[in-house]
Image: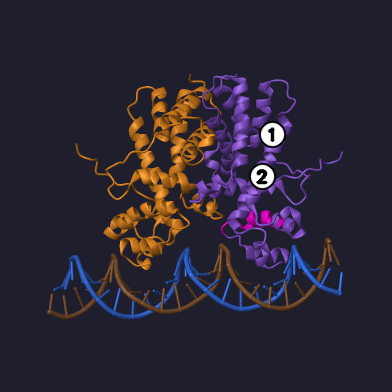
Chain colours: A orange, B purple, C brown, D blue
DNA sequence: TTGCTTATGATAGTAATACTATTATATTTG
DNA sequence: CAAATATAATAGTATTACTATCATAAGCAA
C-alpha cells in the first residue's frame, strides 16, 4: 500500500522560511523534536540544535525567529496532524454516536508513528506537546498570537468534536467545555502516569484513560 | 468576628529561609505575587522584585535559591490554602453527597480574598496558579522534586476528594482521574474564558463552570 | 563562460538573565 | 558591650537569545 502523498500546511506566520521547503529545514524540524524532548524546552537552545545538525545557530534563525516560534510551529503541526486523523477517522461513519466514539478515541489514544511524514516523529512530538504546550499558551503574548491565528487549528478541533456532540445530543449546553476538558485531560493523565503515579488510579494504562474519557463523555451528554 | 489566627505551613525544602519569619520575607511574597501576575513569570526577575521592594537582588536570594523555587513555594501555598478551605468546608456535612458537592464547589468556584493572610492576595495568586503552575510540573527536574515532596499537598487534595467520591459510590473505578480532571479543567476554563473565548460556550461565566463540573462528576459516578 | 540569485557557513558582538561572592553596615540578643 | 544575625551595596560570571556582517558555494539563465 502506498502512503497518501500529503503535506500538512502550517500558517505562514509560524516561520520565517518554510522548513518543509529545504533539506536543512527538515533537519531542523526532526532534530529539534529529538532535542526538545531530550533536554526539555528551557535547556534547548538554537546553538545546541546547530551543533547537532552541523550548522551554525544563525542558519536556524533563518527559519524561525525564536525558539518560542519553533515550539508554536511544532505544536501547531501536531494538532494539524490530529485534525487530519480526526476528519479521516470520522468521515463515512454511519451514526453520530459512532463518530463521537471514534473522535474521543483519537483524542485520547496513545500515539503511533505515521510514516507519511518522514521528518516528524509523532510519538516524540506527542510527548513534547504533553510536556510543553502549556508554555505556548501561558505567555503574555497570547492575545496577540491568538489574533494572528496561531491557535486556529486547536480551536477548530474543539469545534469539530463539539459539532459531533451536538449531533448526538442537540440539547447539551456545554460541548466546548467538555471537549477541551477531554483534550487537555487526556494529555495531563499521560503526564501524571509517567511522573506522579500516586494520583492516577492504580495499574493505570492508556486503555483505561480512553475508557474513562469515553465513558465520561457519553454519560455527561446522556448518550449512555 | 475575629479571624482564625492560623498560618499555612510550607515544606521547608521550598525556601532557604522561611519568608513568613521576617518582614522582608513577607514583602517578598506579597510583591512577587503582584509582579509575577503583572509581568508573567518569564519577564519576572529577582532584580525587578528587589527594585520594587527597595532591596537588592542578593537579599531575595537569601530566602529563595531561585525564581523557580519561589514559584513552587507560591503554588504550594495556594494549594495548602485550598486544602484548608476544603477540610473546613466538608467537615460536619451530614451526607457524603453533600460533602462532594461542597468539595467540587471549592475546587471550581471563583476565588475571593481571605483576610486571614495579610501578605497574600489570593485572587491574584489564583491567576498565577492558573497561568503558571504547569511550568512547575513540566520541568526535567520534576521527578527529583516530587521525591522531595514538593507536590504532596496537591496529591493530598486529590486523595481527599477521591475518598469522598468513594463514599458516594464505592464502586467507581477512577476517582483520582476524575478529581484531577476537574481540578485542572476548572483552571483551564478560567484561562480560556479570558484568552480564547471562542472555545468556551457562549455567555460563559464562572457559575456555569461550576455547574458544568458538578453535573459532570455526579453523572460520571452515577450519583444523579 | 559570465553573472546573478539564493542558501548556507563562519565568526563576532550585545544586552539581559540568573546567579554567586564579598564587604560593609545596621539591628538584635545574651 | 560583644557577638551574632539580617540586610545593603556592589561587583563579577557564564550563559542565553538574539543580531549583524561577510565569505563561500550551488544553481540557473543568457
Q: Which residue position holds label 2? A: B78
In this rendering, the count of numbered labels is: 2
Residue count near mark 2 (Cα–Cα under 10 Å), binned few <14, some 14–19, many ≥20: many
Residue B122 percent location from the top left of the image: 70, 46
Instruction: Judge from the rendering whether residue A203 lies leftward or rightward of residue B48; answer left or right.
Output: left
Identify the mark at residue B86; answer none if there is no mark: 1
Query: The disc numbered 2 marks a residue on which chain?
Result: B
Asked whether residue A202 is drawn in magenta, I would say no
Q: Quadrant of residue B202?
A: top right
Same chain, labels 2 and 1: yes
Q: Quadrant of the N terminus of chain A?
A: top left
Asked whether residue B38 is drawn in magenta, I would say yes
Instruction: Judge from the rendering whether residue B180 lies leftward or rightward of residue B21; answer left or right.
Output: left
Q: Which residues are magenta?
A: B30-42
> Is the residue under label 1 in contact with that under label 2 (CB below 8 Å)?
no
Residue A145 percent location from the top left of the image: 50, 53
Identify the mark at residue B206; answer none if there is no mark: none
Q: Is residue B107 above or below residue A45?
A: above
Residue B138 percent location from the top left of the image: 50, 48
Q: Residue at x 62, y 36 (%)?
A: B156
Amino acid at each position: 500500500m502506498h502512503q497518501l502523498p500529503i503535506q500538512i500546511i502550517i500558517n505562514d506566520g509560524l516561520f520565517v522560511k518554510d522548513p518543509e521547503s529545504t533539506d536543512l529545514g527538515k533537519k531542523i524540524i526532526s532534530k529539534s523534536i529529538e532535542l526538545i524532548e531530550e533536554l526539555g524546552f528551557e535547556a534547548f537552545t538554537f546553538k545546541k540544535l546547530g551543533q547537532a545538525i552541523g550548522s551554525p545557530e544563525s542558519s536556524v534563525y533563518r527559519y524561525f525567529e525564536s525558539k518560542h516560534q519553533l515550539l508554536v510551529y511544532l505544536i501547531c503541526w501536531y494538532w494539524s496532524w490530529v485534525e487530519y486523523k480526526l476528519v479521516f477517522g470520522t468521515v463515512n461513519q454511519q451514526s453520530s454516536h459512532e463518530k463521537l466514539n471514534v473522535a474521543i478515541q483519537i483524542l485520547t489514544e496513545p500515539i503511533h508513528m505515521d510514516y507519511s511524514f518522514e521528518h516528524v516523529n509523532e510519538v516524540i512530538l506527542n510527548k513534547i506537546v504533553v510536556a510543553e504546550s502549556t508554555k505556548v499558551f501561558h505567555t503574555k503574548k497570547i492575545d496577540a498570537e491568538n489574533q494572528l491565528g496561531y491557535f486556529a487549528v486547536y480551536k477548530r478541533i474543539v469545534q469539530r468534536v463539539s459539532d459531533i456532540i451536538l449531533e448526538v445530543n442537540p440539547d447539551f449546553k456545554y460541548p466546548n467545555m467538555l471537549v477541551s476538558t477531554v483534550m487537555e485531560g487526556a494529555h495531563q493523565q499521560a503526564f501524571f502516569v509517567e511522573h506522579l503515579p500516586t494520583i492516577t488510579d492504580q495499574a493505570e494504562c492508556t486503555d483505561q484513560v480512553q475508557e474513562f474519557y469515553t465513558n465520561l463523555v457519553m454519560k455527561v451528554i446522556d448518550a449512555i
